[in-house]
Amino acid sequence: MNDALTYPSDSDLRRLLRFEPDSGAIWLGERRMLLLHTAALAALRQDLIRSVGGEHARRLLTRMGYACGLHDAGFARQTRGGKGLEDMFLVGPQLHMLEGAARVTPVRLKADIEAGQFDGAFRWDDSWEAHAHRTAFGIADEPSCWTLLGYASGYTSAFMGRLILFKETHCAACGDEHCLIEGRPIDEWPDGDAHRHYFEDDSLLDTIDALSQQVEALKTTLSPPVSGGMLVGQSPAFRAAHELMRRAAATQVTVLLTGETGVGKERFARALHAHSDRAQGPFVAVNCAALPTELIEAELFGVEKGAFTGAHASRAGRFERADGGTLFLDEVGDLPLPAQAKLLRVLQDGEIERLGAETGRQVNVRLVAATNVDLLGAVERGLFRRDLLYRLNVYPICIPPLRERIGDIEALAGHLLTRFTAVHNKRLAGFGDRALQTLLHHDWPGNVRELENLVERGVILAPQGGFVEAEHLFPNQPTPPHDSPDGQGRLARQSSDSELALCERILESRTPIAELEAMVLNLAVERSAGNLAGAARLLGMTRAQLAYRLKRNQPGSGDDD
Ligand SMILES: [Zn+2]
């Protein structure tokens, strides 16, 4: 302990402080300050720790304290430029006290700016931050005066012109009687480098990004098992595809799933995984179209630290995460050519190379790729490698569109109804008859996914305990006048009195039936804003039927009966 270390008067510092309530400002010299409740800052600190975790909160708070210290260092020369080095340095601890951080007692101070030497120790009593931490979290395992410590490092680093790292060796937050800090140049600490990141730009976004990818991977792994009846269907087209899938599952063959958007390619891939001997391994799904081109290789194959600006840490790619399991590459046709070349290499050698890595690593992954575009066409346009197509196309399975599986719609809809009533906590009596008819006559451009969306919407809109009716499924489509509900809210499909009356009026009007039909068709098209599928729905016919009739009714079509 250095007996000579006593504070000079701080009247020079107090003079810097000016309250200007008229202009709504507080000044310390030329710097605007803020009088803040410690309780408010403590609450912010607590929220920060809870939301981003202790390690990131520590970094953010250290950097905040560091900025305060950095700015206060300017006052050292400004107020005590003519005094000795010690008095000049003590501006920091004295300002820190004036600002209310803690009572600071110098224990040891050896500083030589020209030689770049610094060795200091200070004791803190009554640190606001130790108090805040203990109040919020109880006795801490680690010293927790992060803003204060950041201040000491920031102040001293600016004062010395080199990075001086302070560490807290005792802390009241840990139950010690007081806090004790020691500081020296960062490279003189054996573990100095490990502390450097507390002063650097926060890479919280990188971490969040990596975490969200892990969550995504977990979600795909934890999705409902195939036994939950994910693949529903008995129609011949569907059963043929299903049988192909089951046979592939027993092998390690690379599978290419083709079919329109929304036919359920990922479900098939999951089912394949679940039926295979890799079922206990991970199932990792990647949508190639959803990833930005510049990130796709890093995503698939991983990155070594420092491979490019922003690669702060090494990271496994999706291939590595799928090791021992199945990797599902959806919309593989959207893969850029350089990534295609790498993918080809993985398929040939079973080895992936992280970006920036010197050597490859073996992975044991079964690849299931999917596309809704014609890959051969893409090859001819130079957008897809022919050799990769041959590798992928060893075992193609074409999943039929929903309009070719009309026989499955009712079962699928029933299955989805059960699922969504559970999800949305509803009790429903089922589909109304007209709703089912509407489903059967829809032409399903969006396939099973569209059906899912419609049924979910229907479940949400249907009244508790009631039926899902057509208007719940297609709320934006005007529904044609239909029969009145029977006692249970069901729609009985039989001629009502009003329909009979309508027919009688038509007969009386002596309008030719063809003209009448043309009028009704045109009205339906008009009401659906030109959307033939919508108009067909209003008329209770398929889009093809409507298109045929419209064409037939056109003057000069020569197709008249
Ligand atoms: Zn402390």
Image (spheres, rainbow, N blue to C red):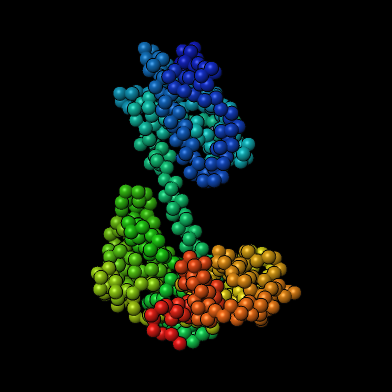
Does residue 375 sit above or below 190 in this rendering? Answer: below
Residue that sits furthest to the right in the current view: 487
Could you tell me residue 413's position as x and y percent?
58, 75
Does residue 197 sit above or below 296 in this rendering? Answer: above
Q: Residue at x 32, y 56 (%)?
A: 294
Residue 434, by quadrant, is bottom right
Q: Residue at x 51, y 70 (%)?
A: 523
Could you tell me residue 473's position as x and y percent?
58, 68
Residue 87, by quadrant, is top left
User: Toward the viewer: 554 or 131?
Assistant: 554
Could you tell me residue 377's position as x and y percent?
29, 74
Q: Is residue 558 visible?
A: yes
User: Toward the viewer: 28 or 188?
Assistant: 28
Does residue 343 sit above or below 145 in this rendering? Answer: below
User: Toward the viewer: 452 or 169?
Assistant: 452
Left or right, 378 with respect to 189, comes to: left
Q: Residue at x 47, y 15 (%)?
A: 16
Does residue 384 sit above or below 548 in this rendering? Answer: above
User: Toward the viewer: 92 or 341?
Assistant: 341
Could you tell me residue 303's position as x and y percent?
35, 57
